[in-house]
Image: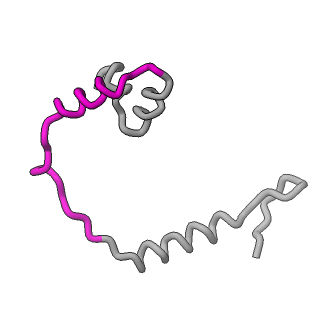
């Protein structure tokens, strides 16, 4: 990816268009020139229960915080 290609990154292109660093026409032209890579895609099967369990574990771990003395304390 060249430095110029970063202008067209979907995560920031809208901002660059609003700031005048990129035009909507140039952005659309760039997108149309991209190759179709549909055949390289894969279907992901996600178990929502598994995600919920992992999220709960992460939230529990994040309950450790620093108190005023700078030592770690677990909040219950």
Q: Residue at x 50, y 24 (%)?
A: 19
- Is 40 covered by the magenta stretch? yes
Quadrant containing the N terminus is top left
When the figure is inspected, residue 74 is found, relative to residue 2, above or below; the finding is below
Residue 5 % position (x, y): 31, 25
When the figure is inspected, residue 36 is found, relative to residue 74, above or below; the finding is above
Asked if residue 3 lies left or right of residue 73, the reply is left
Asked if residue 28 lies left or right of residue 13, the reply is left
What is the total number of numbered labels drawn onto the structure image? 0
Residue 24 % position (x, y): 34, 28
Q: Quadrant of residue 37?
A: top left
Quadrant containing the C terminus is bottom right
Residue 50 % position (x, y): 41, 76
Q: Residue at x 89, y 55 (%)?
A: 68
Q: Residue at x 63, y 67 (%)?
A: 61
Q: Residue at x 39, y 76 (%)?
A: 48
Residue 60 % position (x, y): 63, 71
Q: Quadrant of residue 42?
A: bottom left
Q: Which residues are magenta?
A: 20-45
When the figure is inspected, residue 38 is found, relative to residue 30, above or below; the finding is below
Judging depth in this view, the residue of 26 and 49 nearest the camera is 26
When the figure is inspected, residue 60 is found, relative to residue 14, above or below; the finding is below
Residue located farthest toward the bottom when viewing the structure as drawn: 49
């Amino acid at each position: 990816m060249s430095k110029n290609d970063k202008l067209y990154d979907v995560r920031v292109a809208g901002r660059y268009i609003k700031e005048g660093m990129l035009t909507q026409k140039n952005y659309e032209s760039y997108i149309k020139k991209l190759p179709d890579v549909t055949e390289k895609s894969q279907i992901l099967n996600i178990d929502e229960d598994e995600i919920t369990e992992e999220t709960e574990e992460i939230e529990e771990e994040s309950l450790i915080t620093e108190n005023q003395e700078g030592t770690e304390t677990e909040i219950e």
